[in-house]
Image: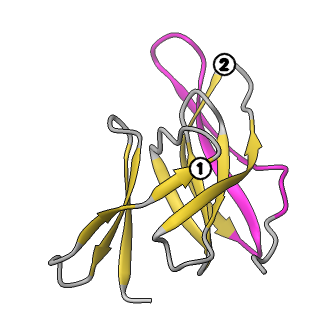
Amino acid sequence: DGVLLVAHMGGDALFRVSLDGKEVTKVIVRGGVLFGDGITLVSPDQLAVASLWSGVKLVESKDQWLSANVTQVYSSPRHRLATSVTVKDGDVYANYLNGFGIPYTSTISRVPFKPRSVE
């Protein structure tokens, strides 16, 4: 709807930015912290958020991203850090950094929640 959604991991915030860059507002998110490292739109009113240590979250909005709610959470295994997300054929996939040492390896796997439409 003519806006860009931007996650700020360090500030634990989600911002709604007009495409001309003249309006920036903080989205009021309820239901948990985001720590969004990577985000992707699942639908116009659903956003998947890779939240590093806290897994992958599905965030939904009913008011064009003025506010939102965390509606589903997938807690990643402890040795995996969710760094980015994407959507293919309606399923959400996360890219994880694996392991505790260097070099890290990467794994992509389907997130086991099924996005649903916001009514």
Q: Relative to residue 8, is residue 92 drawn left or right?
A: right
Q: What residue type is disc 1 on?
A: Arg
Residue 69: image tag: none
Q: Where does the image place residue 26, in percent across and percent down from the top left?
A: 35, 59
Q: Is residue 43 magenta?
A: no
Q: What residue type is disc 2 on?
A: His
Outermost residue on the top side: it is 101
Q: Residue at x 75, y 76 (%)?
A: 118
Q: Residue at x 45, y 43 (%)?
A: 37
Q: Are marks 1 and 2 in contact (CB under 8 Å)?
A: no
Q: Quadrant of residue 46?
A: bottom right
Q: Relative to residue 38, is residue 80 drawn left or right?
A: right
**Residue at label 1?**
30
Q: Where does the image place residue 68, in percent across and percent down from the top left?
A: 57, 62
Count the marks: 2
Residue range of the region highlighted in magenta in the rendering: 88-114
**Residue at label 2?**
79
For residue 103, above or below residue 12: above
Q: Relative to residue 34, is residue 12 drawn left or right?
A: left
Depth order, front residue of 9/88: 9
Depth order, front residue of 50/109: 50
Q: Where does the image place residue 89, in percent across and percent down from the top left?
A: 76, 76
Outermost residue on the left side: it is 22
Q: Tell me how far mark 1 sits from mark 2, CA to CA.
A: 27 Å
Q: Residue at x 83, y 54 (%)?
A: 113
For residue 1, above or below residue 95: below
Depth order, front residue of 80/19: 19
Q: Is residue 109 magenta?
A: yes
* Scheme of image coloration: secondary structure
For residue 88, above or below residue 54: below
